[in-house]
Amino acid sequence: MFRRIFLILLAIGIVAVGLYFAFKVKKQETVYGSLSTESIGKVNAILERDADGDGLKDWEEELWQTGRDTADSDGDGSADGIEVSSGRNPLKAGPGDALDEKTLDEKTTLNQQGEPTLTDIIARDLFARYLQLKQEGRPLDAEDERQLLLQFFNNPLPLEAVVLYTLADLRVLEEQDTESLREYGNKLARIFKKYANKGTNELNILTDAVEREDGSILKELDERIDVYKGMRDELLVLEVPAPLSQNHVDLLNAMNGIVQSVSGMKFAISDPARALGSIGAYPHSFELLANTFAEMKRVFTAQGVIFGSSEPGKAIME
């Protein structure tokens, strides 16, 4: 139900996440959840597209389930956009094609068999809101359209509860000497080096699957999920010096958030709204990871820990 609408939003989400990481690399300030100028330009280009010139934008065609390449879907001589603007059903040939209460109720009610997906539920609400704006008697301007769609992007979708690790889950060493900290730093760095660059980047996989609308491509995410799970599980059994115990908890929670986010991406084709929610959580997990390593570097420096040029832990201090 209206799956392509959410594939469009998912594509926008991927662009925004890519820009987020680009800005972070360039040390520029950015706020995830607020679209950049580049993203807004892409959004507006999508919203303005009307492939068949019938007066209905392509994204509106998805709401009405009319053909994006067919100007008169019901073949009654009236363009789809004219029918919608005059309160007629573009999928029912006139006369007698008025959008009565029964027809509108059918279009805004989940009448399918089986459990509705998150995409189904949100799409129903999206269409109901769209019809409400249409019935206010004024044409939707570009800003109305953009806000209507982007409310689902700028307001994070509900996610499944993620398990949060605590200090009770750690194997904490009471030792706080420099050697214990240095040994921990080397072991930690070895874990991250072991899993580095394994498999195709998940955003590239996701982008490819969305652009092709091919769910089989998403199977490639399994390798990346196993990578992040492997890192998390090895972190969980690593003995941690007491001064770095809270930082280690933060690492575990960041890795667990990444596992959940990438796992959610697997629904990009079958339930894209659910995947869109995962996209929203993805950069925040990486930000927690980066901030935690920065704090660890501060602790190592304060404790006088020095890694040799050939030691793995040297990477933490760079």
Image (cartoon, helix red, strand yellow):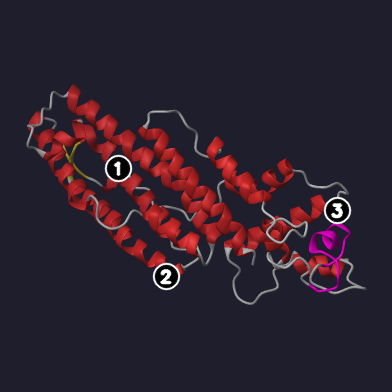
Q: Main secondary structure of the magenta part?
A: loop
Residue denoted by label 2: 216
Query: Circle 1 — which element?
Result: helix
Magenta residues span 74-89
User: In this rendering, would 108 be left or right of 98?
Assistant: left
Q: Are marks 3 and 1 in contact (CB under 8 Å)?
A: no
Is residue 158 visible in the rendered image? The answer is no
Which quadrant of the rendered structure holds the N terminus? bottom right
Residue at 53%, 60% in the rendered image: 272
The quadrant holding residue 36 is top right
- Number of numbered discs present? 3
Residue at 64%, 77% in the rendered image: 113
Q: Which amino acid type is shown beneath numbered disc 2?
A: Ser
The quadrant holding residue 317 is top left
Q: Which amino acid type is shown beneath numbered disc 1?
A: Leu
Crowd tier of the residue under label 1, counting other residues whose Cα lies within 10 Å: few below 14, some 14–19, many 20 or above: many
Q: Of all residues shown, which one is farthest toward the bottom? A: 113
Q: Are marks 2 and 3 in contact (CB under 8 Å)?
A: no
Is residue 75 within the magenta segment?
yes
Q: Which amino acid type is shown beneath numbered disc 3?
A: Gln
